[in-house]
Amino acid sequence: MTSFVISPLLLTRVAGLPSDALDLVTPSTRKLLAEHAAASARLSALAPELTEELFALVPRLDDDVPLRRKALAAKRSVNRLDPLPWDETVRRRMAERLPARSASLLEDWVRLVEERRALLEQLGTQLAEDREQAVRTLHQTLRSGEGATGEAGECGFAESLAIAAPDWIRHRDHKARSAKKLKTLYSYVARAAVKTSPFSGLTTVGEAGTRGQGRGRSRTSATTAYLALRRLAHDPSTAGLLRYRVAPVRPGTPTEPDGLLLHSEVIITEGVVWRHDRAVEADYALTSLSGLRSGATFAELLAGIGGERPFARFVRLLDAGIIHPVVPWTRGEAPFRALAALLEDDRTRSPIGRSELSRVHSLGDGAWRQNTQGRIAAAAELRDLTDGWGGRSDRGERKPSGLVYEDRETELPLPDPLTVPEVRADLSALGERMRPYLFRSHLYDFLLERFTAEFGAGGVCRDPLGFLMRLTVDRDANPPLERALFADMASRRDPGDRAWLPVGPT
């Protein structure tokens, strides 16, 4: 495809702050900025002519070397649009050696430099006042959002920050004007003003050309649910309530190691769970994991693991990322309700009580209805309830901070920017400039070449995971894959003919 099309579905972002809270530059400041820019422009226009006059003067000052040096220093200052490095005596002596027109240029330069200096001094004073007013405005914006959610004229900025940074909101009045506190406040203001991804009410997105309904929804974070799942899996009294998946193992090829394993490394950091999958060499896996199957029960796993202490070996495989608990909830289902349902038998000795799981669910589920203080209280209770779910951890390890996640919809009409001819024209111009930089990747060619070499043109691959694991195995060197990736990086600036290569149904 050699052309481009503007998507018919357009998302519009809405900032979580009223525009007057972000209007942090006063009319007086704008006037001073304009006057300072005008003075600088006049200096820039005057500089070449004055530099030429000083350049012509230098050879005529061979009889007065100190004065010639002052002229050369002035020439350098004019190039930088700086004040002349002369005292009154030098200025008087220089005026005596210059033609009348050149002396007038010097006077104009001195006057303009002084005018610009005075403007800069006024601007410094005005900006200090603006900064104080901006801080007062932003703090007032924080206080305006502390009523019950949904009251007319209320800003939800503070409520959103109570989800994003409950500890900061709780202690915001302590040393409120400190540099660290202000830096944090400005960072969230910037996020609410320009960041595109939705989070609580700091930003919201919706379909352009519609009107938002002001709906809201919240839940306890998925990371907390995952911590609870891992805690249940690590305890012998509750591990049997879950099913487990085993890391996929595939045979290699004559030129590859005998066994390959898809290792899923789970990383938990500050409220988010990341899973990093990579194919690794693992010859041992062909035999040691051959008796284990994904979706197995706990009893089936222990029987397959064997040994004198099968549970200890099970925990080691769990911690190593070879075995993972299968989540007992489906997409869209409340995780903590599903976990609590596993504990219906009151005789089960669980490291996490059923009532705790239910309470953690209700706190997150109801947070969006709460005001700022209610949200802070919910976060504090959640932290106390879930404090021990992570098991043993390093003393310096930071615990999850985002305990509640909220989706919030604006109640404002969302205009369609494409109805503005100038916006559509700009997007069309941008699309025309971008299109030559969208190209068929060398990685695509590499995969296609390997596929046809192994299965033939129009061939069928019954195990795409094994095929991809063999191609992307993580080791000291994978030359074909690395060459394709580096070629793609090198082609970004100038794809050339690759921009117009076809991409088929493959």
Image (cartoon, rainbow, N blue to C red):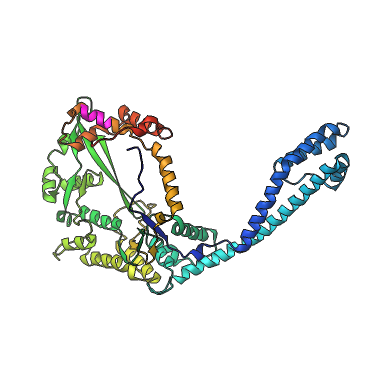
Residue at position x 38%, y 74% in the image: 148
Q: Is residue 283 left or right of residue 480?
A: left
Exactly how many numbered labels are in the figure? 0
Q: Is residue 72 above or below residue 427?
A: above
The C terminus sits in image quarter = top left
Residue at the image point whose x is 46% and y is 71% from the top: 144
Q: Nearer the viewer, residue 334 or 460?
A: 460
Q: In the depicted view, which residue is nearer to us: 8 or 195?
A: 8
Which stretch did the figure color magenta? 446-452
* Residue 319 image offset from top left, x and y in percent: 25, 46
Q: Is residue 498 in sight in this rendering?
A: yes
Q: Please state the horizontal and vertical placement of residue 114, each as a whole percent of the image.
A: 75, 52
User: Magenta: predominant secondary structure element?
Assistant: helix
Q: Residue furthest front?
A: 421
Residue 175 visible within the image:
no
Q: Between residues 392 and 108, which one lies in front from this camera angle?
A: 108
7 displayed left or right of 143: left
Image quarter of residue 303:
top left
Look at the image and tell me in which quarter the N terminus lies: top left
Q: Residue 240: x percent and y percent?
A: 14, 54
Reply above or below: 408 against 313: below
Q: Does residue 27 belong to the magenta stretch?
A: no
